[in-house]
Amino acid sequence: MPERIQFQVNLETSSGSLAIPRQPVNIPSGVYTVWPVNLDLGPAVLRYSTAQPLIHLRGSNTFVFFAWSGVATEFAIEEKPGISIDAPHAHVDRERGVAYVSGIEPATAPAIQIRGQGVETTQILVLTREQALNAWKASLGGKERLILSHADIYFDSQTMHLRADDPSLLKASIFPAWDKAPAGLKDLGSDGVFRSYEAPPRPAPVQLTASVEEQARADDPPPVRISRDVPLIPDESAFEKAARWKIRVPNLRPQSDVFLNIRYEGDIARLYAGGKLFTDNFYNGTVWQVGLRRIPAQELERGLELKILPLREDSPIYLPDGARPKSFKDGEAAKLDSVQVIPEYEVTVDFSHER
């Protein structure tokens, strides 16, 4: 959608009209966001926020939001007797029993703290959208925890696995933290309310190169078949005329996994192992990434076969802007630009003894 200038919602409730936010804001093109209304924070009620809810950590009484770049962040929190609302690094306006907190800069330290008599302090974190996209929630060591990491993460009971194609990304910031580094991680110190850790020692990067040999060029692919104005998937026999390459990959061990990043132009690409179809891809202009972990070592040693069915210039398929091949030879395109071998690294962290 286009940019929205001076955007504001007037919400009719049983207690009257509520303007969200208090002053209109600009919403850049490409932003799609959720604004909470009347969210129970425990000691107080959040009337609204222009930051998006992400995670609630019950054990630490922490609500985590994230801010979209270009959208002014504001929290409207109802004030009640015996409750204090503090935001030391933001601006607070009080009007008719509501504290309006604005000017919040996303950070890993608490943006707002709400204290009440006889209840645990509630804190609000406001992260960047990039941090939110790299956030994970898990129960580890008997507590709900928030993990920030650029690595891929999965959990197996009390075990956390960090995976990345760059060893320098095998890091994680965890909240709530431990008094000492969990087994398998090195303590890097505090980062706001988080504690940062990395894998010691960091694995050394491994350079792997694929051997690519062209086997055959495309041979006059059949015309595109159309049904109800929609192009149909070609018959199996069409792939007999596809362009073909032989790809050989070096020994994969001891990496967690190895990926092929294949850049090509065409209609449909197929990868075969041991003469059998392993996976395929419909061309859309992006890199085709294939994990090789499930292919037996002996099949990799023999080599993989890549087939690319040409994209006909008259094919009516949709492609995003910039994805359509810039040139067609004899009305078709079937081209292998590059094949990269990307090793993946893994670190396993056991939290079963951490409390």
Image: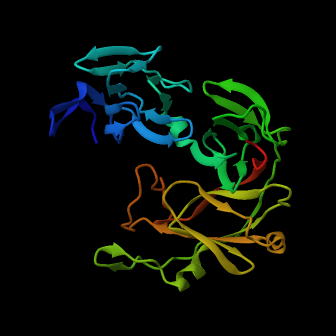
Residue lying farthest bottom? 237
Name the image colouring: rainbow
- Is 311 positioned to the left or the right of 163 in the image? left
- Using the rendered view, name the quadrant where residue 102 is placed: top left
- Using the rendered view, name the quadrant where residue 3 is placed: top left
Residue 217 visible in the current orientation: no
Residue lying farthest front? 118
The residue that appears at 51% across and 62% down in the rendered structure is 283
Q: Quadrant of the N terminus?
A: top left
Residue 306: image location, x then y, percent = 66, 70
The residue that appears at 41% across and 53% down in the rendered structure is 320
- Using the rendered view, name the quadrant where residue 144 is placed: top right
- Is 259 positioned to the left or the right of 255 in the image? left
* Along the viewing direction, whichever of 338 and 27 lies nearer the viewer: 27
Residue 188 visible in the current orientation: yes
* Along the viewing direction, whichever of 171 and 218 lies nearer the viewer: 171
- Is 280 positioned to the left or the right of 26 in the image? right
* Along the viewing direction, whichever of 259 and 330 lies nearer the viewer: 259
Residue 19: image location, x then y, percent = 20, 30
* Along the viewing direction, whichever of 264 and 9 lies nearer the viewer: 9
The residue that appears at 41% across and 35% down in the rendered structure is 42
Residue 147: image location, x then y, percent = 62, 40
Image: 158 above or below 220: above
The residue that appears at 39% across and 68% down in the rendered structure is 315
Image: 204 above or below 327: above
Image: 305 above or below 129: below
Q: Quadrant of the C terminus?
A: top right
- Is 268 positioned to the left or the right of 162 in the image? left
